[in-house]
Image (cartoon, rainbow, N blue to C red):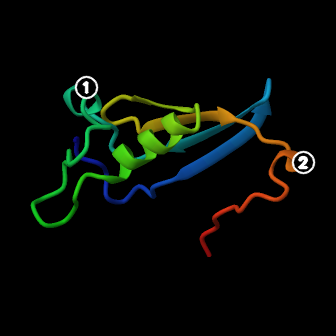
């Protein structure tokens, strides 16, 4: 990771849209960015850049596998000092396709 100006506010922008029967979601942040050697391993189970005891390294690995199981993708674009963009893509599902099926929700 790289140092970030602590006085600068962090920003997160979320963009979603429907494109050719797929849902596209982008998460753009203005944080410190991701080093190339970290970016290569970011979706590996138990990989974390946090100090020992502060993270288990499963969040992005679980997200990656959930998207993969639903015929989706997740990609990351980042440059140290310039933030990151996470791009998610997964098949759109019409309301009529989900009738009679249980849908999980988190409140």
Residue 83 drawn at (x, y percent): 41, 39
- Which residue in the structure is indicated by mark 1? 36
Residue 68 drawn at (x, y percent): 49, 34
Is residue 86 among what the camera can see? no
Tag count in the figure? 2
- Figure quadrant of the N terminus: top left
Residue farthest along the bottom direction in this orientation: 107
Find the distance from the CA under tag 1 to the CA under tag 2: 43 Å
Is residue 35 among what the camera can see? yes
Give 5 or 99, whichever is nearer the viewer. 99
Image position of 92 (left or right of 50): right
SS assignment at label 2: helix
Image position of 77 (left or right of 98): left
- Figure quadrant of the C terminus: bottom right
Q: Residue at x 45, y 58 (%)?
A: 9
Q: Residue at x 57, y 36 (%)?
A: 88
- Which residue in the structure is indicated by mark 2? 96
Image position of 20 (left or right of 14): right
Name the mark nearer the viewer: 1 or 2. Answer: 2
């Amino acid at each position: 990771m790289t140092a970030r100006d602590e006085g600068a506010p962090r920003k997160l922008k979320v963009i979603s849209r429907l494109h050719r029967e797929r849902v596209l979601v982008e998460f753009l942040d203005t944080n410190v960015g991701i080093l190339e050697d970290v970016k290569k391993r970011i979706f590996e189970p138990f990989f974390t850049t946090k100090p020992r005891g502060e993270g288990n390294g499963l969040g992005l690995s679980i997200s990656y596998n959930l998207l993969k199981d639903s015929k989706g993708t997740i990609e990351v674009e980042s440059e140290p000092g310039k933030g990151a963009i996470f791009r998610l893509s997964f098949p759109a599902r019409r309301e009529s396709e989900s009738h009679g099926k249980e849908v999980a929700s988190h409140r």
